Structures are given as structure tokens and as C-alpha cells.
Amino acid sequence: LIGFCACLSLMLVFTIQLLTEMRTFGNMKRRNLSKDAGRLWFYSLPGAVVYGHGDVRANLESLSLLAYVLSDMLFIVVITKQLLVLTCVRENGDLLLLIDKSITCWEGEHRFYAALSLISFAIYVPLSSMIAPMLDE
């Protein structure tokens, strides 16, 4: 659950960043500042991802700090929690969850939590390792 919440929080940070930059871009275009708007978009978070240069110049300080905490400081904690949901041991012929031996792996509720963990892992790792460092400045 911790990993899923961290993943959602990080996605929320990037969504807010994207919407803020799109709003600024739209306002500049509306005021006929196309050249400045193009430059803003090129150096925005989506521009850095789309064009692949990794140089984000227009960012929000508070969102950058939150992205740093979620993707750098808590990275090991979040990844560990996500992987603990998937770690099973074999005891007496049964696969049991390492952190709670009363739960049989890949049956019942464990399937749901394992799927949630895998999905959040597949989103969190790329966001943390490829996109969040662009906000680190």
C-alpha cells in the first residue's frame, strides 16, 4: 500500500506540473507570444521528455521538492515495500507470504495486492529513475 500511494503521489506531482505548464503555454499563445511559448514548451517537463534533452527550466519549487522526496529519499523504502508483497517462501509444500505466513501466495487477496504492487512498481521505477531527476536543479 505504501508503494502504491508513493506511486500515485509521484504521478500527481507530474500531472500538476504538466497542467501548470500547459496553462502557462496556453496563456502565452493567447497573448500572441508564440516564440516565447514554444521556448517555454521546449524546456518544460513534457518537452524534456518528448524531445529527449532532459533540461527542464520551467518548474515549480514545491513540486520539485516533493518529487525529490518521493523519488530519491524514499526510493529504497518504496521499492522494498512493493517487493515484500511479492516475496514468498515454500513451507511444507505451500507458498506462503514472507511477511505474513498466514497468507497463501497467489490465492485470494494476495493476487490483488500482488497485481497492485507490480503495476505500481512498473510505474514508480521509470518515473523515479528517468523523469524525476529532470526536476532536480
Image (cartoon, grey):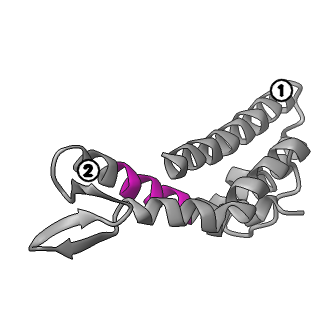
Dividing the picture into quarters, in which one does residue 35 lie?
top right
Q: Three-letter amino acid code at disc 1?
A: Asn
Residue 12 is left or right of residue 137, and the answer is: left
- 15 is higher (above) or lower (below) than 92: above
Residue highlighted by disc 2: 110
Residue 85 falls within the magenta-colored stretch = no
**Residue 136: image location, x then y, percent:** 84, 63
Residue 124 falls within the magenta-colored stretch = yes
Residue at 50% x, 60% y is: 81
Tag 2's secondary structure?
Answer: helix
Tag 1's secondary structure?
Answer: helix
Q: Nearer the viewer, residue 93 or 111?
A: 93
Front of the two marks 1 and 2: 2
In the image, the segment drawn in magenta is 116-125
Dividing the picture into quarters, in which one does residue 72 lie?
bottom right
Residue highlighted by disc 1: 27
Q: Main SS type for the magenta part? A: helix
**Residue 57: image location, x then y, percent:** 88, 56
Dividing the picture into quarters, in which one does residue 87 lie?
bottom left
Of callouts 1 and 2, the N-terminal one: 1
Looking at the rendering, in which quadrant would you find the C terminus?
Answer: bottom right
Residue at 73% x, 35% y is: 22
Q: Nearer the viewer, residue 93 or 21?
A: 93
Q: Three-letter amino acid code at disc 2?
A: His
